[in-house]
Amino acid sequence: MRYSIGQVAKKLGLTTHTIRYYDKEGLLPFVRKGSSGARVFEEDDVDWLIIVECLKGTGMPLKEIRTYIQLCQQGDATLQKRFEMFKKQKEKIEKQMNTLKQYMEKIDFKIAYYGDAIKHGTDDIYIRNTWLATERERLFGHK
Amino acid sequence: MRYSIGQVAKKLGLTTHTIRYYDKEGLLPFVRKGSSGARVFEEDDVDWLIIVECLKGTGMPLKEIRTYIQLCQQGDATLQKRFEMFKKQKEKIEKQMNTLKQYMEKIDFKIAYYGDAIKHGTDDIYIRNTWLATERERLFGHK
DNA sequence: ATAATTGTTAGAGTTAACTCTAAGTCAAGC
DNA sequence: GCTTGACTTAGAGTTAACTCTAACAATTAT
């Protein structure tokens, strides 16, 4: 199956503008054009865009994604480098997940805090922000 | 304890420029200035900055964080709104975590792929990108 | 007392990633 | 044959979040 830029954009939740921008930035060097000049997306091209979204979504800058595709185009000699790249990205995601978990704890504390405050009609006096105090003490090393 | 902008910046991993920028954007309206005009951070101010980092790190734009602090300053009448804000943010984090998990699966697939390719010395022929093919088929609804 | 450090401001400049516009081509339907 | 819709390009404009500069003041170290 082949797809137009519009079809791909719709399915991946991007705009055609964005996909053309990616192309301009060298992220889609293999996408061919039909006789009229319109981009024709093969299934492999869609797969590649899915990987681009994945790398972008885990915080890799477009420049670095382009570096990856350039490695791909250089053939088997760069297999090891590409392997390392993904292992590094995996570590990055693990860190992100841990950070998110810590943020979640803070948010959960706030939800409990406000739940309590609403029950009492005020957050003026009695509630101490113990969780954050703990965090601050950890950072600054005293109580 | 009180802290200078530099001490706070160092501990929270920000630059003094960034903290002043946050102040300019209305994120730190309560931070007082000493006799010389220098910002003096109370412990509560540090706690607030920790919350700012948390909201920012889960993708809330600075504008929206400012809206939250404005709600805080309006007193008990906005408790419910603030509660909802954090519940919404919690949902957002949950979505982010799920997305990260899905990305992790793709990255793990790539790591396995390249591990295998390195063993064989090439990724030319034999390895089919089955995982991504599955994803593409899910999006486009055919094989 | 002088030099280094740390702070201040207003405001300019940068960066990434879009986002949009204008002017045009091309294929399909009425 | 003409309109509609999807595509093309080059290039301008936007946005968020910094990031830096210049010129100056105050504090701290030697």
Image (spheres, coloured by chain):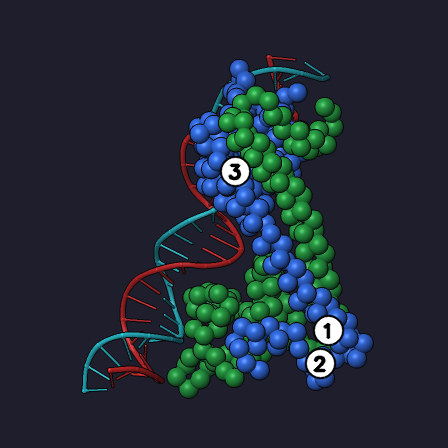
Chain colours: A blue, B green, C cyan, D red
Q: How many marks?
A: 3
Residue A127 numbered mark, or none: 2
Task: Please report whichever mark, 3 or 1, sits nearer to the chain's N-terminal start.
Answer: 3
Tell me the crowding category of disc 3: few under 14, some 14 to 19, or many 20 or more residues within 10 angstroms, Cα based. Answer: many
The reply to whether discs 1 and 2 touch (Cβ–Cβ < 8 Å) is: yes
Q: Residue at x 69, y 49 (%)?
A: B98
* Same chain assignment for discs 3 and 2: yes
Task: Please report whichever mark, 1 or 2, sits nearer to the chain's N-terminal start.
Answer: 1
Q: Secondary structure at mark 1?
A: helix
Nearer the viewer's eye, disc 3 or disc 2?
Answer: 3
Tell me the amino acid under the disc marked 2: Ile
Q: Chain of mark 1?
A: A
Q: Quadrant of residue B116?
A: top right
Q: Residue at x 55, y 34 (%)?
A: B114
Left or right: D1, with B36 as reference point:
right
Q: Chain of mark 2?
A: A
Q: Chain of mark 3?
A: A
Q: Observer-nearest residue: B114 or B101? A: B114
Pointer 1: what residue? A113
Task: Please report whichever mark, 3 or 2, sits nearer to the chain's N-terminal start.
Answer: 3
- Above/below status of A99 relative to A17: below
Tell me the amino acid under the disc marked 1: Tyr
Pointer 3: what residue? A83
Q: Secondary structure at mark 2?
A: loop
Between the residue at mark 1 and the residue at mark 2, the CA separation in whole angstroms equals 8 Å
- Residue B99, image x and y in percent? 67, 47
Tell me the amino acid under the disc marked 3: Phe
The reply to whether discs 3 and 1 touch (Cβ–Cβ < 8 Å) is: no
Q: Residue at x 70, y 85 (%)?
A: A125
